[in-house]
Amino acid sequence: MGNIMIVGVGGQGTLLASRVLGNVFLASGYDVKVSEVHGMSQRGGSVVTYVKYGKEVYSPIIEKGGADIILAFEKLEALRYCEYLKKGGRLIVNTQEIDPMPVITGAAKYPEDIVKKLEALGISVTALDALSLANEAGNAKAINVVLLGVGAKSSEIAKEKWIEALKATVPEKLLDINLKAFELGYNY
Amino acid sequence: MKKLMLGNDAVARGLYEGGLSFASSYPGTPSTEITEALAKYDDVYSEWASNEKVAAEAAFGASVAGARSFCAMKHVGLNVAADLLYTASYTGVNGGFVIAVADDPGMHSSQNEQDSRHHAIASKAMMIEPSDSAECLEFAKKALALSERFDTPIILRLSTRVSHSQSIVTVSERDVVPMKKYEKNIGKYVMMPGNAIKRHVAVEERLETIKSWAENCELNKTEINGSKTGIITSGISYQYAKEALGDGADYLKLGVINPLPENIIKEFCASHETVWVLEELDDIIETHCKKLGLEVKGKQFFSLRGEYTATEIKRVIKGETVETVTAPESAPVRPPVMCPGCPHRGVFYVLSKLKLYVSGDIGCYTLGAAAPLSAIDTTICMGASVSMLHGFNVANKNAGVAAKSVAVIGDSTFIHSGITGLIDIAYNRSNSTVIILDNSITGMTGHQQNPTTGKTIKGDPTAAVSLEALVKAIGIELVSIVDPFDVKTLEAKVKEYTSLDAPSVIICRRPCALLKYVKPSAPVTINSEKCVNCGMCLKAGCPAIVKKDGKMQINPVLCTGCGLCEKICAVGAIVKEAK
């Protein structure tokens, strides 16, 4: 059984990451549900997708206190959804900051020291600059696959299965960049 | 073969396997992907129609011809198509006719959270509801045959979580279903009073027939685990209930929502000490139970608003709560925004600056109501921007109230139902200015072609509506085409047209920044020596412009180099980055 949440900002590629995860668990013989977000929130809003696997999965949704792992594509989104982690859950967070409109207009401040504050809650945090690694791989948009790589390293599923799922999900012309991004995350 | 499939894709697969041959839809979240998926099957004719009423009528025409036919829409789309539905329910069908309607509890991407089950009850059409992708496939496939068997349109009710969740399905081959023969039958298909009176008798008889069938059909399932607690539920609520209660309860999972069965519900209630009805939105099943004189628990404990959760079901029924960590502080909200490079931004910058009354509509550009632009005054339903502006202006003029106003409506929404309102404006000569935001695509629902784009659902070239020729043809004489990033010209044109006592149209034309053929330019930068920190550029509400440590900055990753802020900056501090 496992519950994985992917949180980020609309346009960051959370959908692709959740589809890769879904295919990995399907190929590993689990029942799987993946819940996606379409429509208005995709326009730069806060987005969340859920991936659940196990012997039998019912609800496609992960609720507060239910996630084993959160992959946060942006730091503020990690803070927003931290209550969804189980006690002792793991957070993999891209340290990139994308200011939401209330911060841009000066109506709110971007919170400081998010990673430290979340660590203080007893959450196991892996914080990394996935944007730099994605750029190193050849495309800023590959942060989704960098973060998948980090998560894959500590999963019970063999690396080859992850690479197969990537190949099945990612468009062919972007495959090389994504395989490189995955390696950079995996070896982080 | 086992596959992970989106609920909407599974509906399309089921229809394909069930011998569907005709599909016509108008996009609407969360229903859009069904028709997009159907477009990939060459054996099925598929199209985008100009609105849901047209789509439903086209599909029903195909049914009368004898073809298995389908249309998909979001919940509010069924309001538009309701006219066809209510009377097609009287005539019945020839080829199987299925309407998928996707509700949006929680309003992830909608203007209300109406419960479509009311439409099924009111129209007396049969409605069925799946709860995951496997059932989406199974129910959609069966619906085509059931429609023919019971001579009724069938509404396949979905919800956001069923439509937009992937789960495992097993696909099989397509059934070969020959087209049925059309035979002229005036008594069945011409709904003038004398015939309709007779058909209504048939409709009531049909409901009774389906009800008896539903007592013992495979779409309604009872799951007995030996518990004293019984759960009556349907759709996604079944999944939440199973998640929360597992084998600790018995279940009556209803797949047929209209008409609801009676005997199996009575028997289920009689064999359980406590029975809960778990259904999102309105209390349709609960009311049905209470009419049967059954004691059930439901909306007294659960909300009529938003989505159900397993946590809430556990809390109410089992009294259990979930342990969570507490966030160290609250995160500033991150509402959706217009994308960097969005052509709508230029329009709303001008409208916000001129402080006009802005009659809004449904699309990405509804975000023109969000801070800091805050330009839009009203958003109600598809096409309402245009007709409401007309009423607003006539009422003000007659009362002697001076109010400068415009309507904003996207290209696809204009074709959907803006054109009818504009004809009203032209015909009744109101002093109304309508701005058509022509970004060459249906944007919000994820880039669907429409009658103005010159391409079909499959991307093949076709006739394109000329918006300028169309509006002139209906009697609008003042028509201008402006680039929305040319804010100077746009501002002058808006000022000119809104000061005239005549109907007028401004077509703001620039393709959506997310279209593949729209290539971003080099990002702009801020010359800190010239910048006087006036904050004018922030008024554009572009996510790429931020104020950091008291100074304006451009985020080069987000900036598409659209140049709007360059034009807004009064001191020339924003410049294209030298490459």
Image (cartoon, rainbow, N blue to C red):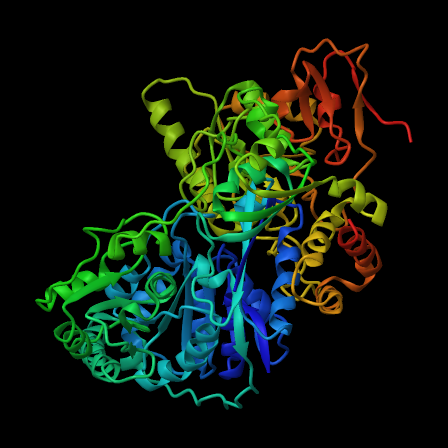
Residue A1, percent from left and from top: 52, 64
Residue B273 placement, left or right of B400: left
Question: Which image quarter is the C terminus of chain B in?
Answer: top right
- Towards the viewer: A134 or B119: A134
Please determine whether, in this image, residue B395 is positioned above or below residue A106: below
Residue B377 placement, left or right of B43: left
Residue B262 placement, left or right of B434: left
- Towards the viewer: B165 or B480: B165
Residue B246, percent from left and from top: 35, 67
Residue placed farthest to the right in the image? B579
Question: Which image quarter is the N terminus of chain B in?
Answer: bottom right
Total labels drawn = 0
- Towards the viewer: B470 or B358: B358
- Residue A161 seen in the figure: yes
> Which residue is at 22% across, 79% downward?
B211
- Residue B473 seen in the figure: no
Residue B113, percent from left and from top: 36, 49
> Which residue is at 41% across, 82% downward?
B142
Residue B529, percent from left and from top: 82, 10
- Towards the viewer: B151 or B188: B151
For residue B41, what is the image quadrant?
Answer: bottom right
